[in-house]
Image (cartoon, rainbow, N blue to C red):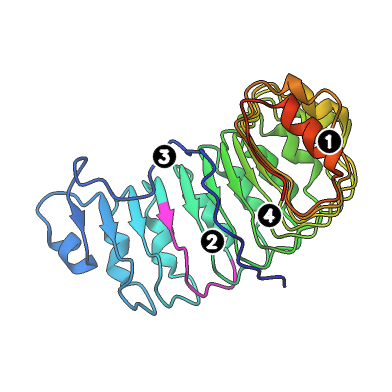
Amino acid sequence: MKKIIAVSLCLLCSTGFSQFANPKESHVFYSVDEAVASSTPAKQLNLRDQNLFEVDDNISTLKDLTFLNLMRNHLESWDYAIFELTSLEVLDVKINSLKYLPAEISILNKLISLDISSNKINQLPAEMGKLKNLKYLYASENYFITVPQEIGNCKQLEVLTLENNQLSYLPAGIINLKKLKVLDLGLNQFKSIDPGWGAFKNLEELKLEYNYLQTLPNEIGDLSKLKILNLSDNQLTVLPESITAISTLEYLVLSNNKLEKLPENLKALTNLRTLIAINNHFSTSEKARIKAALPNCHIQLD
């Protein structure tokens, strides 16, 4: 699988939700024993960076837990005691060695945020679709080839990150995610974008860098709230004129493609503040036209 480390860009975006424990909300515990022994119900348990190979089974007694962080340990399999924590709203297992996500994840039906990034998971179970309250799904750096159709049932999803997997398409049901604001599909194997993605009327950030895109559908112009669009490191030779209809666009990255010109009506992108399009095939006259059309935009073409 392609595992390229992309240059980190400051993309103006905020998910609007913290994955971190909040000590102002309730006491944060750092061991299962401490939490179990507490005279008040434990709601937040932070076990990150503790070199754990398994989770203490006594965790199952912490029925009031809403926050559990197991990030950066050595977990290779799931401790099923976790699925007895039915009050969980935030579950973070990022940077472990988990090879699967069990169907029992559906038991945690109060989850708002699930982070399974940087594991070795090769598929999402269909039961994911039962997580009706899920707003944030972070699943980058795994081994997904497909995403289940049932993901479209998670209709509260606002952030979906699938960067650095092996995806070449998304299921048709994805267009049911009407509240989606952030979609990160960088470092995958997409050769085209489904025109149906134009239905993402609330999308603010779309990342498709390091794929194999040769064209974009005209429907991309229907993304009427899009602020950030990253299309760098693809095989694009032309952009549809419809992209200039995205008047909200603030940040556009087109570097390392095969573009010879940009759409004629560039001046319509009145909110564009940054355009990065280095390593394309623009002529000197085209570069001058681009700069003249976007006088209030920071532009990098060389």
Of the numbered discs in the image, which one, if any, rests on residue 117? 2
Q: Which residue is mark 1?
A: 262
What stretch of residues is rendered in magenta?
Answer: 91-100
Q: Is residue 254 magenta?
A: no
The Cα–Cα distance between marks 4 and 3, rounded to whole angstroms, is 22 Å
Q: Earlier in the sequence, mark 1 or mark 2?
A: 2
* Amino acid tagged 4: Gly
Q: Which residue is mark 3?
A: 17
Number of marks drawn: 4
Q: In screen coordinates, is 151 left or right of 132? A: right
Q: Tell me where residue 175 sits by quadrant.
A: top right
Q: Which residue is mark 4?
A: 186
Q: Is residue 98 magenta?
A: yes
Q: Would you say residue 194 is visible in this rendering?
A: no
Q: Nearer the viewer, mark 4 or mark 2?
A: 4
The Cα–Cα distance between marks 3 and 2, rounded to whole angstroms, is 17 Å
* Amino acid tagged 1: Leu
Residue nearest the observer in this picture, 172 or 35: 172
Return the x and y of residue 207 as percentages of the image width and height.
Answer: 67, 46
The residue positioned 53% from the left and 55% from the top of the image is 105
